[in-house]
Amino acid sequence: MSGPALEVAEVSASHSRGTGTRQVLAPLSFSLPAGQTLAITGESGAGKSTLAEIILGLRPPATGQVKVHGEAWVGPRRPVQLHQRRLVQGVPQDPSAAFVPRWSIRAFMAQAISRLVPGGNARELISMAAQLAQLEMALLDRRPQELSSGQLQRAALARAVAVQPHVLVADEPTSALDPRTAEQVATQLFSAASLTGTTLLLVTHDPQLAARCSRTIDIHPPQRRITHPRSFPA
Ligand SMILES: Nc1ncnc2c1ncn2[C@@H]1O[C@H](COP(=O)(O)OP(=O)(O)OP(=O)(O)O)[C@@H](O)[C@H]1O
């Protein structure tokens, strides 16, 4: 492993609309050493979730590239390779999106481990992840809809750390929770990242949560500009 844990270089994003393309994330560059925590803040529509999706490899950037420990991770024409997929994991705002409804939490985590961590000991990794997320072991045998929202968010955190990522991307992970549960989940998120030395990128509107990160980047919406292909009649 070499280089920063996460390197974002001139990454921008666009959405297509009709025959035009609208830039939704202005070119952004930053790098994060291993174990550092970064808050991404900014007004609604600034492109925070879009940036999180790009770093998670869920959509390609329009320009630029992302590297993880010096290795190419994603670019405009470079999707994430399966053998690298475990390196960056997400904790979503809606944790039910992290699971399959008819599978137990344990079954889903075991499947993720077998796919992403060849030779990994699923039993050990699941147990370690549940401890890191402070998720009671008995809850692992339930299905997602049988958990409270706080328990399910801890399960999503356990699922993410079970494959031993280098970078965790959490997009508003506590915004759907009541204040007390949100505080507990936030503490478990920071503690799991710190205990494992995982770099944490946290998208948040919450200034208190942002203040718990070692660094903050405030992003702004790009200038509203629609570009059309050359063949489009003026
Ligand atoms: N699928 C899509 N198609 C077209 N435009 C989209 C799509 N998803 C998001 N956008 C636009 O991209 C821009 C950035 O959206 P994004 O969700 O990244 O913002 P955000 O900073 O996360 O906002 P919020 O804080 O409200 O969640 C917005 O103008 C949004 O309308």
Image (spheres, rainbow, N blue to C red):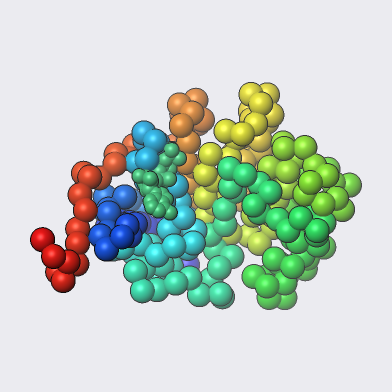
* Residue 128 seen in this snapshot: no
61 over 84 or under it: above or below: above
Residue 193: % across, % down? 59, 46
Q: Residue furthest left?
A: 234
Q: Which residue is pictured at 68% across the width and 72% down the height?
A: 115
Between 12 and 169, the one lying in front of the other is 12
Residue drawn at x 89%, y 47% as measured from the top left? 138
Q: Nearer the viewer, residue 228 or 101?
A: 228
**Left or right: residue 135 compared with residue 193:** right
Q: How many marks?
A: 0
Residue at the (29%, 39%) spot, across then down: 220
The image quarter containing residue 5 is bottom left
In the drawing, does residue 8 fall left or right of residue 180?
left
- Residue 150 at x, y = what percent? 72, 36
Q: Quadrant of residue 127?
A: bottom right
Percent position of residue 166, x then y: 54, 58
Task: Work out whether residue 102 can be spotted.
Answer: yes
Q: Residue at x 56, y 75 (%)?
A: 83
159 left or right, relative to 91:
right
Q: Image quarter for residue 160?
A: bottom right
For the C terminus, the image quarter is bottom left
Q: Position of residue 113 (x, y in %)?
A: 71, 67
